[in-house]
Amino acid sequence: VTLGDGRLHDRVRGASWPVNATAAFVLERSGHPLGSVADALAVAHGASRAQARADVLAFVWALNEAHLANVLRGGRRLARLVGFVRVAVRLTPAGRLPALAARRRELDTRSLRAAVWSCAVACAARGLVVACLACVPALPLSGGSPSLAVTLAASTALGLVVHEAGHAAALLRTPAALVTHGRRTVVLHGLLTSRRTASVALAGPGVAAAAGVAVTAAGALSTSLELAVAGLPLAAHAAGLTVLATDGRRACGL
Amino acid sequence: VRALKAFLLGAVATSVLVYTALTTLAVAVHVSGGGLSLTLGGLTFLEARADGGMDVLVIGPGVVLAGLAGGSANALAAAITGRRSR
């Protein structure tokens, strides 16, 4: 995403939006702490610091919501996690979670290998979180067997990576980015022909489901329960081919 | 075309899900040393048994029927979704 000629250009989506002088002022200072940007804005426009901070925060959150800017929080990860849990507990009576920032990572789609690798790297942190979270239901589901639980959790995380890598591979030589926002993981791309849109949508769940069938079949041939179980979370991505999922609806042109 | 596409995708998805679930179940039964036969109205879904020192795993025509049912359900859901979005 770049700023030029008074417009904000998104290379991946192939779109641009006009920006006013204040927005350009903030965007030109991307990479700087938001507090210092707000202070500079207050000085430049003769506004109060509180008003400038509120305006900058609202603008940056709107950009983040539109997947046009990343908001990186300072401090240690553990401290951030503790802070998140603290706010989440306070918001419990309202039945809401603290606002989660979207994170956009560019994908290198110049070659198949680069597309798969860049997607795997972009998904790695998310995959680790998914694996840790999957351990919770995996342990009782596996009848208390740690090896089966770890297999299920690892396969669940692998499923996420394979699914998104499938989308990235189908977007060969097309600008793309991986966006993680709360529970959602999305591969962002520009407008494509209806046929290409369908093939990109099918590639994610299709590749993951095919991998699931292959792993389960290998488990049956070698009578390895771990291998057979490992295929289940991967094969579950087949549900993404139906109209219950966004990919399935997109593939059907809905 | 949309209905056919939805039917095919639904059939593939259901077949994959049923096949992997049944195969994993068969391997689990085999590992525990037992045998298993899953039939519905005479239609075999899965049969796992030891036959003369050989392990026999039969994924029956029930999987195909489940796929057809899943495909029909998906085509119906696609038609309803398409009508609502118009």
Image (spheres, coloured by chain):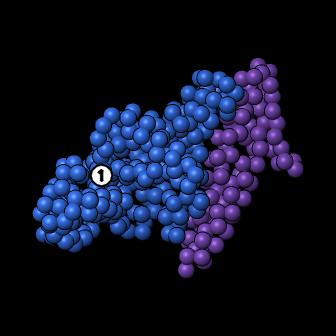
Chain colours: A blue, B purple
Residue pictured at 68% horizontal, 40% vertical: B21
Which residue is most to the right?
A: B41
Quarter residue A58 falls in: bottom left
User: Chain letter of disc 1?
Assistant: A
Compared across the picture, whether A118 is left or right of A24 comes to: right
Q: Nearer the viewer, residue A19 or A41?
A: A41
Residue A42 visible in the picture: yes
Residue pictured at 30% horizontal, 37% vertical: A75
Q: Amino acid at mark 1?
A: Asn
Residue A224 x, y percent position in the rendering: 62, 25
Compared across the picture, whether A42 is left or right of A114 comes to: left
User: Quarter of the image containing the N terminus of chain A?
Assistant: bottom left
Residue A205 visible in the picture: no
Q: Is residue A157 above or below residue B18?
A: above
Residue B81 x, y percent position in the rendering: 60, 71
Disc 1 secondary structure class: loop
Compared across the picture, whether A69 is left or right of A254 comes to: left
Q: Is residue A45 above or below residue A130?
A: below
Residue for badge 1: A70
Quarter residue A42 falls in: bottom left
Q: Residues within 10 Å of mark 1 (few under 14, many from 20)?
A: some
Residue pictured at 65% horizontal, 40% vertical: B20
